[in-house]
Structure formats: C-alpha cells, structure tokens
Amino acid sequence: MDESRELNAVIDVIMLAGTILLKSGSEIYRVEDTMIRIAHSQGIVDCNVLAMPAAIFFSIENTNISRMKRVTSSSYNIEKVCDVNQVSRELVGGQIDLSTAFTRLKEIGNQPLPYTKFQVTIAATLSAPFFSIMFGGNTYDAFGAAIATLLGFAFSLYVEKFIRIPFVTAFAGAFVFGLIAQFWARYTGFPSTADLIIAGAVMPFVPGIALTNAVRDIMTNHINSGMSKMFESLLITLALGAGTSVALVLMT
C-alpha cells in the first residue's frame, strides 16, 4: 500500500510538472524530457511519455499504470517554464524531496499572469513605433503606428473576453489598426504611409513564440505537434492579413 501511494505521488509530480510546462507554452520536447528525468530520478526507468498541445500521456512499462491529462487552454509564460525547470533540476539533483517539489509546483501553477492586460497593451503600443521606423517610416508613421496599435490591441483583448479564438481576436485587432492606419495616412495631413504604419502595428500581433516552438518541435522529430503549432501560427498570420485587407477594402 505504501509503495502504491509513493508511486502515485511520483506520478502526480510528473504530471503536474508536464501540465504546467504545456500550459505555459513550453516546447513539446522540453515537456517530455522534464517528465522523463523526474521519473528516472525517482526510480521509474521503463516509462513512456507522449505530449501533445492538447494532452499529456504517461505510462509505465509492464504495468497497468497510465495517466492522461487534457489541456484545454494555454498561454505563453516563460517565467513559469523556468521555475518548473528549476524545481525539476533540484528534485533530480536530490536537493529537495518529492513533497516539497509537489508543493512548489502547485504554487507555480497557481501564479497569475505576470502582466496585466493594460501593461501588455502599453508594451505593444510602445514597441510598435520602433518597428515602423525600422521598416523605413518617419516620425509621423511612428505616431500613427502607436495609436493604431493602442486601439487595435485593446480591441482584440476586448473581443477575447467573448470569443477565445486566436484567429478571431487577431482578425479583430488587424481590422481596427488597418482602419486607423488608412485614416491616419489619408485624413490627418501628415506625410505618412499606411503600409508603414501597418507594418509597425502588426508586429505585436505576430505569433513569434508559437512559430519558434513549432520549428524547434519539428527539428526534434515531434512532427505532429510541430505541424499543429505551425498551422495555428499560419492561421493567425492569415487572420492578420485578412483583417487589414478588409479594412483597406472598406476605406477605398
């Protein structure tokens, strides 16, 4: 009975670590590697781990023990990924015991997002003008990109409250900053170019982390997970293009 209870405690830690990593936007190979390392450190040598963007599977060879965890939502939080990796290293290195690791993982999992939506919007607004200048825009293009990003990003976060679909929120944000860019270039009288304003405003919406993780998963032979993330990234990119195109058509 004690061995069974101890084994369940080990699997609880393994599944919790993997779940937090997956929900925080970690690469698939990192999720599987962390779970396997924890299992090996606790004496579970013959084990199998399969992680996908939507679920995690763990089983032990020659037994009827298996676990599955469904992951329905995720957000990119690199801080949590680093914290889980640190707990894993300490557990594997024998610096902490299993109960301490489980407690710390619970605390990490319950941590809120490090930044509020207001802070994220401000960060996007401040970064957009520099992208516009980098692409060859002038000061007026930079100001236009800041205003377009502020309104577009805020509107996309508002839409996200009701429709938690990245494709829809990206389309909504692109539609708004596309309209603002066209209006700024045509009616303010400033020597601005709508394309350069849009080029700066679109950058905070680009799914760079998702695309990078997709490439890394494909390179580590996680083809299914990598391709699904790649397809999701391409859909978001398509939504950004569709939103700006609809705005351009309405303004002509």
Image (cartoon, rainbow, N blue to C red):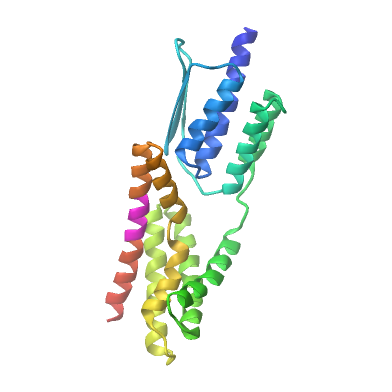
Question: Image point 53% across, 44% down: which residue?
Answer: 24
Evaluate whether residue 11 shows in this view.
no
Task: Report the residue that reaches farthest toward the top.
Answer: 1
Question: Image point 57% across, 48% down: which residue?
Answer: 78
> Is residue 201 found left or right of 113 in the rendered image?
left
Evaluate whether residue 178 shows in this view.
yes
Question: Image point 48% across, 77% down: which residue?
Answer: 133
User: What is the span of residues highlighted in magenta in the rendered image?
Assistant: 232-238
Image vertical order of residue 9 relative to residue 50, above or below:
above
Image vertical order of residue 42 relative to residue 224, above or below:
above
Task: Report the residue that reaches farthest toward the front.
Answer: 219
Q: Nearer the viewer, residue 228 or 40?
A: 40
Placement of the C terminus among the 4 image quadrants: bottom left
Q: Quadrant of residue 37?
A: top right
Image vertical order of residue 249 relative to residue 230, above or below:
below
Task: Report the residue that reaches farthest toward the bottom.
Answer: 189
Instruction: Tell me residue 190's x, y (percent).
Output: 44, 90
Magenta stretch: helix, strand or loop mostly: helix
Instruction: Tell me residue 98's x, y (percent).
Output: 67, 24
Instruction: Tell me residue 160's x, y (percent).
Output: 46, 56
Instruction: Tell me residue 209's x, y (percent).
Output: 47, 52
